[in-house]
Amino acid sequence: GPGTTPLPPAQTEAQKTDAQATKELAARAAAEKWLAIIDAGDYGKAWDQSAKAFRENVKREQWVESLPKTRGALGAAKSRTVEVSSFKPSLPGMPAGDYVTVRFSTNFEKKSDAQELVTLVYEDGAWRPLGYGV
């Protein structure tokens, strides 16, 4: 009838992928910066920069104590490249939001074909790590 507003056109797949690609790139950059902090052995600082849910799940002391054991066995990180990153609007047990998982192929001194997995959430205007596995 009169006065009805036409619906905005649905987002095309291409536009969606663009928005997602932008998010993935930003999350990737954040993950790389964060891993550099871990590489430097600044584990407390890495914890401080992580997402709220991460800090609620893992106590700072736990993290600072466990990480040298995990990473120490591998030696220093020599190089890392992004293998894949994937955007998700939600994760099991987490509220809807912007999530990106980034998988790196990493060469450590003592293990040349390791994989590192960082999951990030967009929180308080920044991409913050929610999980780390190696």
Image (cartoon, rainbow, N blue to C red):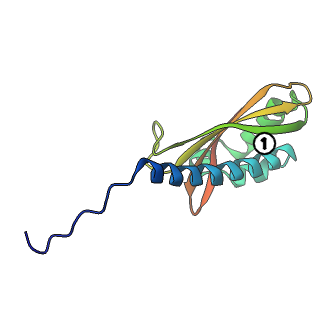
Residue drawn 53% across the image and 53% down it:
18
Residue drawn 58% across the image and 63% down it:
125
Quarter the C terminus occupies: top right
Mark 1 = which residue? 64
Q: Nearer the viewer, residue 80 or 73?
A: 80
Quarter the N terminus occupies: bottom left
Residue 97: give x, y in percent of width and height: 47, 51
Q: Is residue 121 above or below residue 115?
A: below
Residue 55: give x, y in percent of width and height: 63, 48
Q: Nearer the viewer, residue 18 or 66?
A: 18
Residue 129: give x, y in percent of width and height: 65, 47
Residue 68: give x, y in percent of width and height: 84, 35
Q: Secondary structure at mark 1?
A: helix
Residue drawn 71% across the image and 52% down it:
29
Q: With 90 as the anchor, is 36 left or right in this view?
A: right
Residue at the outermost bottom position: 3
Q: Residues within 10 Å of mark 1 (few under 14, many from 20)?
A: some
Q: Nearer the viewer, residue 94 or 122?
A: 122
Residue drawn 90% across the image and 37% down it:
78
Q: With 11 as the anchor, is 7 left or right in this view?
A: left
